[in-house]
Amino acid sequence: MQSVQTFLDLMQDLIIGVLRLNPAVFEAVLDSSIAGILALIILFLAGISDTIGHSVVFFANRVPRRRFLFAIVVEALGFVTGVFIWAASIWLMAGFIFNAHQNYANVVVTVALGYAPLLFGFLILLPYLGNIIFVILRIWVLLAVLVAVSVDYNFGLWQALISSLLGWALITFLARLPFFRVNRIDSFLWRFSTGIDQELNTQEAVDQFMREIQSEWASESDQ
Amino acid sequence: MSTLLTPLTCLIFLAFTLLIGMALLAPFESLGWWAGWTKRDLQPTIELQESNPEADLPAIYIVYLTAIGGISADISSREKRFLTRLEEAYPEKVVIIDDVFPFSATNNPLNGERPLAWLWQRLHNSRLGGKASIFATLIFVRNLFQVAVSGDPRYGPIYNFGVARELIYSLIRHGYPPNSGIPIAVMGWSGGAQIAIGVAPYLHQALRAPIYIVSIGGVMSDDPGLDQVQHLYHLQSTIDQFPRISEVLYPGRWRIMRHSHWYRAENAGRISIIDPGPMRHTGKGDYLDRNTLLPNGQSNLDRTIEVIIAALQGQKIPQLVADNTPPP
C-alpha cells in the first residue's frame, strides 16, 4: 500500500515539476529507472486524455459505444508511437547538427515526460474554450520538450529549439514521401480502432447525411 | 481569516468544478444522439408533400427561438403575447412557429426525458415563484453552453443539424410546402439568434427556401451558416451590451477579420444592424416590454414589432421620432 502511495506521490511531483518547466525534474528522471517508467505512464495517460479531447471525431463518424474505449486506447497508442518517433528525430538531429550524443532511451523518457501538460487534454472538449486550450497545451508541451532536450544534451535554448523543430520537420518531410505510406498507416489504424472505413470531420459527416436524405426525398417524390 | 477562507475557497472550487463539468458535458447530448447512442432516432420520419398551388399559402413562415432562460418550447406569456401581436400586425398571411426548444439538438426540453428533469423543473418553478436563487442561474448557464456548442465548428454542424431537423418537422406540420420558395424567417432572441444562423444552411438545403434571420439582441458567432442566409436583421439597442460579448469572444467578429463569414455577409449587404431605440437585453425595459415607453410614446414591444415587420417586408425602418419633435 505504501509503495503505491510513494509511486503516486512521485508521479505527482513529476507532473507538477514538468508543468512548472523545472529542469531538475528532467534531471531526476534520468537518474531513476522507476521515474522512467512513470514518464511513459504519464505519456500514455496524456495520450488518452488528448484523444478524449478530440473524441468528437468518433461521435461524428458514429463509432459504436462498445468500440469507443478500444478506439481511444488504440489512438492513444498511436499517439505514444508518434512521440517515440519525434524523440528519435530529435536524437538524430542533435547528433547530426551539434555532434551531441545521448542514449536514445533517455531522450524518449524525457520527451515523454514533456507531454505531461496533455494530461489536461480532455479540456479540449470544452465548447469554444477548447480550441484555445488546444493551442495553449501544444505550446506548453513544446516548451517542456525544449527543457527536456536542453537537459538531455546540456543544450542552450536555441540548440534545443533547432534540434526539436528540425526533428519535427524531418518527420513531416518523411511522412510525405510515398515510400512510407503514412496515409495508409493512418487509415489502417482508423479502420482497426473504429471499424469504420472512412474518417470524416463533423461538417463532412453532416453534409454527407444531408445529401443522403435529399436523394431519399428526391427518389420518394419521383415515385 | 483562515477559518473563513477555507470554506470560501471550497465553495469557489466547487462552483468552478461544477461549471467545468457542465461545459465538458454540454456537447454530449447532441454527439450521443448523432452517434446513435441514445434512443432518439436520427433518420427523418416525415414525408415531404408537394405544395398545392391553389391553396392560400402564407407569405412567410416565422420560426421563433427563445432566449437562454427557457427550459422548454413552452415560452413565457410575454413571448406569446409578442408573437400574437406580431401575427396580428403582419400585413400579409403569416404562420408563426414556436414549438421547438432550441437548446437541445433533439427538441428534448430540460423537463423532458432526462435523468435530471426533476432538478430543472424545480429550478424553473423556484424562478417562477419569484425565489430567484443562484441555482436558478444554472438554467442560463446550461443553455449558454449549448449556444457555445452551436457556435463551435467542431460541434456546431451536428448540433445545428439536429435543431434544424426539428424545425423542418415543425414547418412541415404547420403546412410548409417544400420547394415552394416561401421565405422562412428564423427569429432568435439573445442566444436563440446564434442557433438561428446555425440552422439556416440545413433549412435552406432541405426545403430549398430563402432563409431570413431576425436577431433580437442576438449573441452570434461568425457562423458559416451566414453564407446561406438571404439577410440578417440584427436588432441591437445602444444600451444593450450583451450582443457586444460575441464581438469580443469570436475572432470572426473582430473588425480586422475582413474575410470572415460575418464580414463577407456584411460587405455583401446581407446584414442590417438596426437600433430599435433604447431597450435593455432582458427584464424591465427589454425588447418585449409593453409597459416601458420610448420617447415617441410607443411601447418597446410595439416598436420591436414595427421594426421586424418593416425589415421582413423590405421596407425602410421607420425612424424613432420623439413626440415633442416639431413637424418638418
Image (cartoon, rainbow, N blue to C red):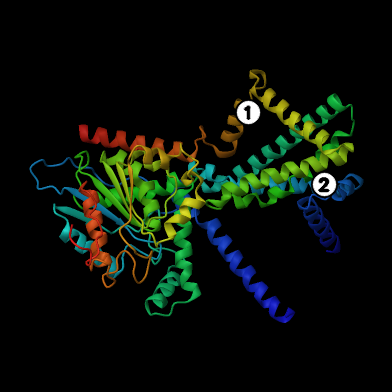
Image coordinates of residue A101 in percent, x first then y, are: 90, 30
Residue drawn at 31 percent across, 65 percent down:
B75
Mark 2: secondary structure = helix
Mark 1: secondary structure = helix
Q: Viewed as shown, does residue B1 lie left or right of A220? A: right
Q: Nearer the viewer, residue A203 or B311?
A: B311
> Of the numbered discs in the image, which one, if any, rests on residue A37?
2
Q: Quadrant of the N terminus of chain A?
A: bottom right
> Of the numbered discs in the image, which one, if any, rests on residue B10?
none
Image coordinates of residue B289 in percent, x first then y, are: 29, 69
Residue drawn at 37 percent across, 53 percent down:
B193
Q: Viewed as shown, does residue A208 lie left or right of B254? A: left
Image coordinates of residue A98 in percent, x first then y, are: 87, 27
Where is mark 1, residue-wise? A185
Residue at mark 1: chain: A
- Residue A223 visible in image: no
Q: Viewed as shown, does residue B158 lie left or right of A86? A: left
- Residue B183 visible in image: yes
Q: Quadrant of residue B52?
A: top left
Type of amino acid at the residue the image marks with label 2: Ile
Type of amino acid at the residue the image marks with label 1: Ile
> How far separated are the C-alphas under marks 2 and 1?
27 Å
